[in-house]
Image (cartoon, grey):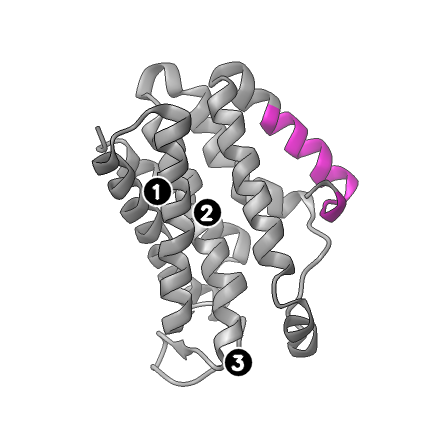
Amino acid sequence: MVAMLDKPGLALSIIFGAAVLVFGGAPYLALMLFFLMLAIFVTKYGYYEKKEMGIYEHDRSWENVLSNGLIPAICAVLSPIVGPMPYIASVAAVTSDKFASELGVLSGEPISLDGFKRVKPGTSGAVSTLGFIMSLCGAALIGISAIFLFGVSPTAALLITLAGFAGSIIDTLFGVLEERGLGTKGTTNIICSIAGAIIGLYIK
């Protein structure tokens, strides 16, 4: 992921990582690093197809780091008060969205929720069957990892998976507004992670 970040993005990721480690601890940082590893994999997967479609993104800026890492970092800072679940669920949400957006584009033309018409891959507010499946898989990987890193129960891991998936769905809904010029990819990513964190507050 370091190689995919510009210098401001790298600096911000180090700040977020330090905050996560100091206020959360090693399991929190390990979960964040696991997300970064998954993000690298799904971003590079299908490289040639994505490049041909003109939607491959290699270099990531500080805006991308901010939109994906701000809410999890805040949740880590607040973890002594709210516990680990909001943090875990927010990471599950951004992972779910990452899987949906990076892998779902490989299924052909998705259907836009704005008018339910076929649109080009990479269009915000659009869905595909593969995108839904990959979204669930991404969230599930975070839920499963939470069993080993945080000692959560299988039931809690399932709820984390659903929370992450819900965050991705909310991201897609706000993506419709993004396509209409209301907001950006960054704002929808933040909303996605906020949704996951809020749901995480109610996971025990």
Q: Are marks 1 and 3 in contact (CB under 8 Å)?
A: no
| Residue drawn 36% across the image and 76% down it | 114
Which element carries disc 1, helix, strand or loop? helix
Give the percent coordinates (x, y) of residue 150: 37, 24
Give the percent coordinates (x, y) of residue 86: 35, 31
Residue range corresponding to the magenta coloring: 3-17
Give the percent coordinates (x, y) of residue 188: 46, 54
Picture quadrant where residue 194 is located: top left
Amino acid marked by disc 1: Gly
Q: Are marks 1 and 2 in contact (CB under 8 Å)?
A: yes
* Gap in angstroms between the C-alphas marked 1 and 3: 27 Å
Q: Which mark is residue 133?
A: none
Residue at the spot of label 2: 94
The crowding category of the residue bearing disc 2, from other C-alpha atoms within 10 Å (few below 14, some 14 to 19, many at least 20), is many
* Gap in angstroms between the C-alphas marked 2 and 3: 22 Å
| Residue drawn 34% across the image and 81% down it | 116
Amino acid marked by disc 3: Lys
* Residue 57 on the magenta span: no
Which element carries disc 2, helix, strand or loop? helix
Which element carries disc 3, helix, strand or loop? loop
Q: Quadrant of the N terminus?
A: top right
In the rendered image, the vertical position of residue 90 relative to residue 120, given as above or below: above
Residue at the spot of label 1: 196
Residue at the spot of label 3: 120
The crowding category of the residue bearing disc 3, from other C-alpha atoms within 10 Å (few below 14, some 14 to 19, many at least 20), is some
The crowding category of the residue bearing disc 1, from other C-alpha atoms within 10 Å (few below 14, some 14 to 19, many at least 20), is many
| Residue drawn 33% across the image and 21% down it | 83
Amino acid marked by disc 2: Val
In the rendered image, the vertical position of residue 73 relative to residue 44, given as above or below: above
| Residue drawn 72% across the image and 45% down it | 5
Q: Earlier in the sequence, mark 1 or mark 2?
A: 2
In the rendered image, the vertical position of residue 74 relative to residue 130, given as above or below: above
